[in-house]
Image (cartoon, grey):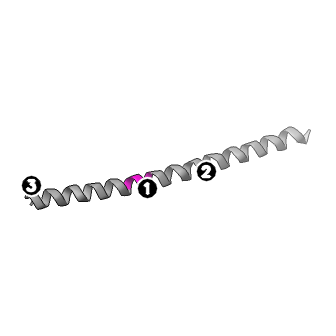
């Protein structure tokens, strides 16, 4: 009688661990993307400032 209960609990724990791992990977990808976009934006703004389009 305890077997289905414990196996369900183990499956639930594994599912929670999988969701946590996916969230960590997604956050890491989002941070890398944000850093790259920030660098590109800085370069574009510096170019526009140099040309005299801004400021």
Secondary structure state at the residue bearing disc 3: loop
Q: Earlier in the sequence, mark 3 or mark 1?
A: 1
State whether the magenta stretch is mostly helix, strand or loop: helix
Mark 2 nearby-residue class (10 Å; few <14, some 14–19, many ≥20): few
Q: Is residue 48 left or right of residue 13?
A: left
- The image quarter containing residue 4 is top right
Residue on which the image places disc 2: 20
Q: Nearer the viewer, mark 3 or mark 2?
A: 3
Q: Is residue 36 above or below residue 5?
A: below
Residue denoted by label 3 = 53
Label 2 – label 1 distance at C-alpha: 17 Å
Coordinates of residue 27 in the picture (x, y in percent)? 49, 52
First-in-chain label (2 vs 1): 2
Q: Residue at x 92, y 38 (%)?
A: 1
Q: Kindly give the residue lying farthest to the right in the view shown.
A: 1
- Classify mark 1: residues with Cα within 10 Å, few (<14), some (14-19) or many (20+): few
Residue 26: x and y in percent read 51, 49
Secondary structure of residue under mark 1: helix
User: For mark 1, what is the residue?
Assistant: 31
Seen in the image, is 41 located left or right of residue 49? Answer: right
* In contact (CB < 8 Å): disc 3 and disc 2: no
Q: Residues within 10 Å of mark 3 (few under 14, many from 20)?
A: few
Q: Is residue 17 above or below residue 5?
A: below
- Residue positioned 11% across, 57% down in the render: 54
Residue bounds of the magenta highlight: 30-34
Mark in front: 2 vs 1: 1
Is 55 above or below relative to 8?
Answer: below
């Amino acid at each position: 009688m305890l077997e289905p209960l414990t196996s369900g609990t183990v499956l639930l724990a594994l599912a929670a661990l999988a969701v946590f791992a996916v969230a960590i990977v997604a956050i890491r990808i989002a941070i890398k993307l944000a850093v790259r976009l920030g660098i590109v934006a800085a370069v574009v703004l510096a170019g526009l400032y140099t040309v005299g389009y801004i400021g």
